[in-house]
Amino acid sequence: MEIEQSAVVGHHHAMKEIQELKITLDQTKEKTYVTLMNPDAGVYILTYKNPVTDAYIPSEKIPCNASASTFASAVSEYYQDTVGSAVSVTKIDLDAAGAPTLIAADVAGHRYEIEVIKLIEGVSTQQILVAKVGTAA
């Protein structure tokens, strides 16, 4: 708030007040988590259920030990086609108890966090199914 005072006392313009209002919106982007425990050298696909058409749409094949960028490449087409947005994927290594770990010898699984970059109305999917399509030889 800002107050200005004029030299003319008692005049209706003797004091001027300016108020500023600041509004901050807290907007959260949609995040989906895919957790894979005990990964092998196999490959799997995610099948998304489109929330508008109820159609099931498969991702590209994803290696069980995929990097975040490989995972993002495999699922990005679904998000682009369905909600018109790119995604950001973060990979977190997990220990046997499902807790995050930075120790390579303790890694027993991975959690992929998929964040839709654009704010969307509703949800990007109704359901995600996981199917293994190949295993280690």
Image (tube, helix red, strand yellow):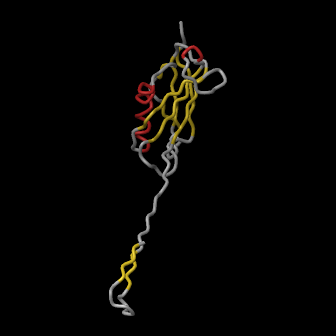
* On screen, residue 96 above or below 22: above
Q: Quadrant of residue 60?
A: top left
* Whole-percent x, y for residue 106 in the image: 60, 17
Q: Is residue 39 above or below residue 100?
A: above
Q: How many marks?
A: 0
Residue 122: x %, y % from top left: 51, 50
* Residue shown at 51% from the left, 39% from the top: 55
* Quarter of the image where one finds residue 73: top left
Could you tell whether 76 is left or right of 123 in the image?
left
- In the picture, the quarter occupied by the N terminus is bottom left
Q: In the image, residue 46 lies at what x, y percent?
A: 52, 29
Front one among 109 and 135: 109
Q: Identify which residue, 45 or 99, lies in the foreground.
A: 99
Q: Give the farthest residue toward the right.
A: 97
Which residue is at a point 62% across and 27% down the rendered structure image?
99
Image-quadrant location for residue 105: top right
**Residue shown at the point (39%, 73%) measured from the top left:** 2
Query: Please, which residue is most extreme toward the top here?
Result: 137
Percent x, y of residue 18:
39, 76
Of residues 107 and 35, the one drawn nearer to the viewer in this rendering: 107
Residue sitting at x 43%, y 30% = 72
Residue lying farthest to the left in this orientation: 7
